[in-house]
Image (cartoon, helix red, strand yellow):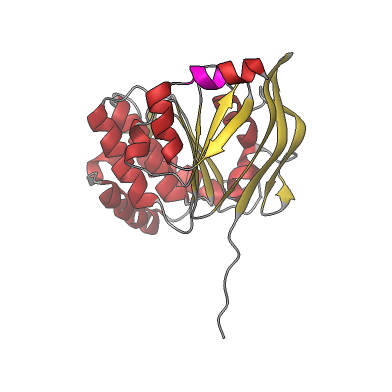
Amino acid sequence: MFFFSKLSKLEIINVGVKVGDKRVVQDVSLTVSQGEIHAIMGPNGSGKSSLAKAIMGHPSYKIVQGNVLLDGESILQLSPTERARKGLFLGFQYPVEVSGVTVLNFLRASYSAMKQGGKEDVKVQVPLVPFKKMLSEKLQLLGWNEGYSSRYLNEGFSGGEKKKSELLQLAVLQPKIAILDEIDSGLDIDAVRLVAETLNKLSGPNLGLLMITHYKRILQFVRPHRIHVMVDGRVVLSGGPELADELEEKGYSWIEEAEEQE
């Protein structure tokens, strides 16, 4: 007799988002399951990053319409930490530098927080020796040596190293669904290829990816199952990976013009 585990699913249902008094996302719906790769593309100011931050619970980005479900349960009343414990992950467009905090200590604290089972007041760290062993395996997977873990988080890192640092966090925390906000921004083509190779190593049946990007270039190396185009806070077009080629050739103006004519 065979038993099949149910795939986790992130459902974004008719979501609207406000920043202050400004509505930045309008009635967005899409679903990402484990094992799937989705990409959201669109021009600057279209609401892509605002949607990502709202899903993760950033206090400045308020979901004022619709719902977000993870495994069928609403996450809107959960804190960002609780959402992370449920299996969500957000990779930032601009990773911050944290002087005085090593990569090892940061990741150990983050991993420990994920394993506390909702006990916000518990500050016990996971044992150091087994954690360092696990971290060493993740570093090897990403092609980094052990010395990297003793560096201060993102301090003195190149743009590519900062983005790869986000992916190391993803590898350690092992979320069900990861949202990557412009993981390719500010990178030259060699760095994009390196980040994409790392992302492909982490992809698999236990990880659902929602990638936010302006450009096709990373999608040449990490092929999405579906592409969604956002304009003025709304998803106006969805399609297969070939949609990226059309956007590369035509840009976004033809979509914006079509929207204005409706």
Task: State the image quarter where residue 55 is shown.
Answer: top right
Task: Tell me, yes or no, whether the highlighted magenta stretch contains residue 260.
Answer: no
Q: Quadrant of the C terminus?
A: top right
Q: Residue at x 55, y 81 (%)?
A: 2
Residue 106: image x %, image y %? 43, 39
Q: Residue at x 27, y 36 (%)?
A: 193
**Which residue appears farthest toward the bottom when viewing the image?**
1
Q: Is residue 43 above or below residue 149?
A: above
Dominant secondary structure, magenta: helix
Task: State the image quarter where residue 232 is shown.
Answer: top right
Q: Residue at x 30, y 32 (%)?
A: 192
Residue 97 visible in the displayed image: no
Q: In the shown orientation, is residue 35 left or right of residue 196?
A: right
**Residue sitting nearer the eye, 243 or 223:** 243
Stretch of the chain drawn in magenta? 252-256
Q: Residue at x 57, y 27 (%)?
A: 230
Residue 71: image x %, image y %? 66, 54
Residue 154 visible in the displayed image: yes
